[in-house]
Amino acid sequence: MKDIPFFYFDIRARIVPGSLMLAAVVLGCANIGLKIPKPYDQWMIGNETWKSVVIPLVLAFVAYLIGDATNAIFRPIATRFGRIIFSIAAKERLKLYPSSIPEFTCPQDRDSYRLDLWEWLLLDKQPRESGALLHAHRFLSEARMFLNSSVPAAVVIFGGIMVQHHFHARIINYCFASISGAATFMGFLYCGYLCEKRRWTQTFSAARQLRFNWRGRE
């Protein structure tokens, strides 16, 4: 039962980006005039009872697979993104608690501390029992969800506007759709930034309260 929240966080972090990516593909096909060939176009239409059960499950499974692939594609970007935000969160933490984080002499020490701190949170008994791991993992999954959803969400907004006004004021709609898509992209990135920073803030708090010992230093 204790693992159910982590399972839910991972599912959400993959299904949301996968669903948006699937919607982006559908809107892209609609914009260029592609249609599902017959008789496959009737698969999702009808009042059959089995369709109300099977189709949502199939779509959720497909969305999860796409989200998993998206997570793998975005992983190098997410890793770099996390390093930058870790540095920002660490500087803010040092202003509040000057001696709570070791002074780093080089970037390698900072990366080593970041990895060791997260491994301690994952593997040590104290963070798991105190709930610190649950909270940090929640913010990590939300950060990944927003980051991985940023591009497909922007494409969905752009494609949706273009589909709705396909034959009217094309240039004006193109500009409006582009601005809306860019705003959506930046909004998702900002939300991901806030969640990632909160993840490390939560982790720093746990390390301070539970006295995380790094290389013989608390």
Image (spheres, rainbow, N blue to C red):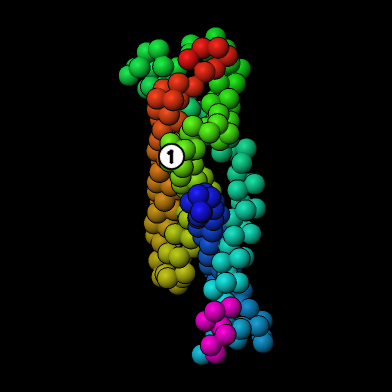
Q: Residue at x 53, y 26 (%)?
A: 117
**Is residue 131 something that shows in the picture?**
yes
* Residues in magenta, as a range: 48-54
Closer to the camera, 70 or 207?
207
At mark 1, the secondary structure is loop
Q: Residue at x 62, y 53 (%)?
A: 68
User: Magenta stretch: dominant SS?
Assistant: helix
Closer to the camera, 39 or 175?
39
Q: Is residue 207 above or below residue 29?
A: above
Residue 125 x/y as whole percent: 53, 33
Q: Quadrant of residue 41?
A: bottom right
Closer to the camera, 96 or 24?
96
Q: For mark 1, what is the residue?
A: 131
In the picture as drawn, the residue positioned furthest to the left comes out as 96
Q: Is residue 8 magenta?
A: no
Number of disc labels? 1
Give the left or right position of residue 94, taking residue 65 as reference. Answer: left
Residue 204 x/y as whole percent: 43, 26
Residue 25 x/y as whole percent: 58, 64
Q: Is residue 53 magenta?
A: yes
Q: Amino acid at mark 1?
A: Gly
Q: Residue at x 43, y 39 (%)?
A: 131
